[in-house]
Image (spheres, helix red, strand yellow):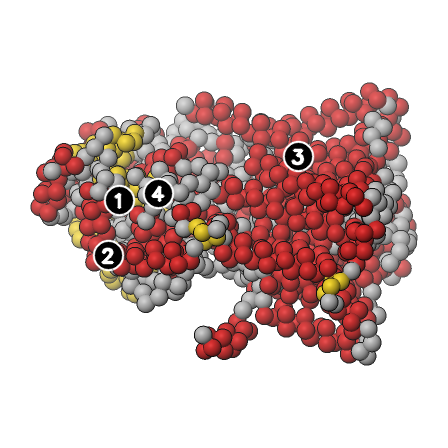
Amino acid sequence: MQQATEAGSSPPARPLVALSDARMAFGAVRALDGVSLTIQPGECVGLIGHNGAGKSTAVNVINGGLTPTGGSVEYSLPDGGTGTGAAAARAAGIRSVFQELSLCPNLTVEETIRVPHHDLSGFGWRKTARKRISEALDRIFPGHGIETGATVGDLSLAERQMVEIAAGFAEGKMAVRLVILDEPTSSLDAAVARQLLAYVRTFCSAGGAVIFISHMLGEVFEVASRIDVMKDGKIIASRPASEFTQQSLIDAMGHVASTQAEAATRADAENRLGEEVLTTPEGLSARRGEIVGLAGLAGHGQAEALARFFMSRSAGMRHTKAPEVTFVAGDRGRDGVLPLWSILQNLTLTTLPSLLRNGLVDRSAEDGLGKDWKQKIGIRTDNMSNPILSLSGGNQQKVLFARSLASTAPIVVMDDPMRGVDVGTKQEAYDMIRREAEAGRTFLWYSTETDEIVQCDRAFVFRNGQISAELVGDDISEENILAASFEMHEEAS
Amino acid sequence: MAEQKTSMLLHLHRRPWFWAFAASALAFAATYALTAGSGSGELLAATLTFATFSAIVGIGQMFVITMGPGNVDLSIPATMTLAGTLSLKFMDGATTLILPGLGLALLVGLAAGLFNYALIRLLRIPPIIATLSASFLYQSLAIWWNRGLRIKPPEALSDFTTGSVLGLPNLTIIGILIAVASWVLLERSLFGRWISAVGQNTRAARLSGVPVETVKALTFTGSAVLASLTGYLLASFSGGAALNMGTEYLLISIAVVVIGGSSIAGGNSNVPGIWGGALLMFLVVSMLNSYGLGAGVRLILTGTIIIAIVAAASGRKDCA
Amino acid sequence: MSGRYRILLPILSLAVLLAAVFYLQPRAMSYFGLNLLFNLAVPIALATIAQMMIIMVNDIDLSIGTFVSFVACVTATFLNETPLLGAGILLLSIMVYAAMGALIHIRQLPAIVVTLGMSFVWAGLAVLLLPSPGGASPGWIRTLMTVKPPFVPMAVVACILIAAVTHLLIMRSATGTLLRAVGGNTQAVLRAGWSVTKLKAGAYALAGLFGVLAGMCLVGLTTSADANIALRYTLLSIAGVILGGGEFVGGRISPVGAVIGALTLSLAGSFLSFMRLSPDWQIGAQGAILILVLAVRLVFARNGNRWKEAKNG
């Protein structure tokens, strides 16, 4: 902290971290497309943007977790020099507090700090650790009531998040100079969140720096001295917080989508839709032939709602030729692709029970189905027996679409299926979904992209695991979705 | 068609099971040379017979391993012993009871497999622990049943297990038939597709409508049934059930799967390799025997071979 | 299951079993009786601690039984006749354990298969050393194991000592904490800039060390060795860790619990013989106990969750 204070007292100080034209590509996806930013001691930067804008990639580049594929990241070290890389980031006093908890649930509160603080060892380390973490907890969350001897796994979600934040700010051998807070208040109640915001202000006025990411715009305005808005891997606006209003922020994040094409199809929606075919405990409902969108920021319970619904309508023990519901995965590696198999085998997995002859797989019928769908959905390959991994991401996604649509299931669940898919493929997929819906299929479509939600007949916006808005017809607009995804100031207080 | 055949021959060495067979041929030649050609017929017959036992349990283990990391059946030796002792005591040397005895052995396997699966599912414990602790129950049951007696198998059964047709041991014929059936099951049937899907990505399989739990139950049951069949045949072949008769088959069942080119990471298995691995395992043992090396060196070598193959073959699983 | 109550179940099961044994055989309630009951508990406790080190980093060691047998053979031969060479061999075997841990992590191998393979290597080496039972215990180990301290028998004193030392090492020290962190959240440890390969090798080396101690103590008690002397330790050690409140994944282990678990298991053997249960069922009973413990814990865990949910609203 001493260094931080010194640095803060002699402006203009050297920036703690400087990104210049940083680029990061994952395959064909450009997650960061030339980002330049500097963080000065004493600054609190609010970093906001919609899903996929590149926030988390930017954070991981800043904390040294990812090495950018282009451009440079430079840290100023306490000894006056500069450095690059993960070790330099640690030496420069940069700490991250992530949304996904990075604590070890089997350790006690005081023990958790042993992992990031390399200097804790020898006799009496435990006393030092206890002092560091309890000081940080007392400083940030006065009256927290967390015992340092408690096991992390036994704490409530909010308490765990408090420990994680305290561990990020805890003083060690190396001074803490920049703390990155990614959705730090997601599990905290309002009173505790206020404590954190107050502490962030104190920390920054004493010369520390914070990068603050939150979907609660009110919080961002409360602490940030500067707000950087990200979109499509770029920083599109960077101004002092006082120059923004909540409305101008939402406008800056979004863009106007063309909704004219959809309007026509929606007009006859009433005639097309049938009886209600599903309702879930969360409050989702859908009618026959309806395309229902699940919107909101990523990680606010949409995927879980879909998975719960799918699991409740399909069993692990029985199999059937006519499943009630099929699933189109968006996280292809985790949920969809079977990496050792051919395109054809991947495509026919769900429909296989109806392709049997004498108890064995009828290969000619399988080939026929493959040929059918290759043409119908336009899978770009010369041979369906090529390995699935030889396809581009977009074509792999088409195979997963075909796997579901080839079945007779009346309901199709889609878990953000257009992730990392090129524009052309997307358009084809949209057309296909619409055709299938007109033929009477019901779609539950979770998407992180507003353009896609706008195409739906009805949309449910999720926030903090609950439905915060139900939009129908022309009410489904980017503005309304963003407004329901982000918590406005009035609600927060 | 002819072109396809030549290209198949040319690419033979790319098949995962090729190296197991090549190594077996080498080991056979080495042993053959050492014994100066005498008794090569017996060596071949012995190799085929003993490899049969390893191959049958290996096929069961292969299906289990195909389901992915953490899936191993450690109860194979105990199931073999239990099925062997129970069925031999039941038959008590009576020729008329041969088939009911076989039925009993298979029933033991069925019960053991279902019990294993029930433990995995109900106690939600890793398959290793479930099958390991269950194996001690089976072992105890076998000890209690056997009471140290060595009951001879019915003569007709004994003759059948040691006999041969056209130079091919009867047991080997059974082993090959089981291998062919398993190959069809794995490569051509719905169940084979499902098991491979589960092994590659259980989550994706479940989300694509594969009845994952049924696949698991059938696989563990299948492995136990094959183990019980092997126990029945081995006990009949060797003139009676011994309480330690299954012991060496634990490592062998895993070894033949690994040597045969199946992926220990799951999802990718092949049946011919099991036979290649089984032949190789026996030949390595008999080669070391004919070099006059004792049990100690044999154990060390088999252990080392397994680790070397696993370390060389598996490595990091590239996830898409 | 809550961390603080983790230790209750093992203590409870030991107490119940001890009470049952005393009820069946009141004469066991004496210095001599206790010594007899817990005689073989010391090597089992050490082997259980060894297994715990592996389970701590989310692996399982299927070779610990043959490894302890191998060490017993080395102790009864080399360590007795040429102590320096014997000590060298044992030191080397600990390094082999460390190398195994590093290999498993670097190549991301399944620990089950590697340790199963190693179990055959150790068994082979043991057979080479002692093809038939024999050898002799070094005098100093024998003396150490048969010491008669006042009031409490040696076995109990030794177990308390083992529990205390490993508790300090694993639960209290900074290094032990880091090792448990590997089991709890490997990614977090990696992100904080530690070498997980080194940490895993360290955990395996500790397992090797305690395996060596187990083998030496075993020879001290039995005065001779054979290649199959400790084969059942593989299951006993896993059962001991689980009985002691440890879990298969997540680095949730308890050294004190593991020692209590080992004591319970060795007591279970005596209990079963007091019950006049035929020795045929001894092995099966151990399997049954493990299954029973897992079932009881599942019930506890379910209730615990329900309670926690209710508390957190």
Compared across the picture, whether B127 is left or right of A14 comes to right
Q: Reading the chain from its start, which is encountered first: label 1 or label 4? A: 4
The amino acid on which the numbered mark 2 sits, given as a three-letter code, is Thr
The residue that appears at 78% across and 73% down in the rendered structure is: B40
The amino acid on which the numbered mark 1 sits, given as a three-letter code, is Ser
The Cα atoms of the two marked residues, 1 and 2, are separated by: 16 Å
Q: Is residue B3 above or below residue A254?
A: below
The Cα atoms of the two marked residues, 3 and 2, are separated by: 53 Å
**Do the CB atoms of the residues marked 3 and 2 lie less than 8 Å apart?**
no
| Residue A249 quadrant | top left
Q: Is residue A408 above or below residue C9?
A: below
User: Could one spot residue A337 in this view of the protein?
Assistant: yes
Q: Which residue is mark 1?
A: A447
The Cα atoms of the two marked residues, 4 and 2, are separated by: 21 Å
Q: Which residue is mark 3?
A: C291
What label sits on residue A326 in the rendered view?
4
Residues behind callouts 4 and 2 on a single chain: yes
Residues behind callouts 1 and 4 on a single chain: yes
Q: Is residue B281 above or below residue B124?
A: below
Instruction: Check disc 4 and report its element: helix, strand or loop.
Output: strand
Percent across and percent down for residue B8 are 50, 74
Q: Determine the chain carrying the residue at label 1.
A: A
> Which one is in front in this view, the residue at disc 1 or the one at disc 4?
4
User: Could one spot residue A468 in this view of the protein?
Assistant: no
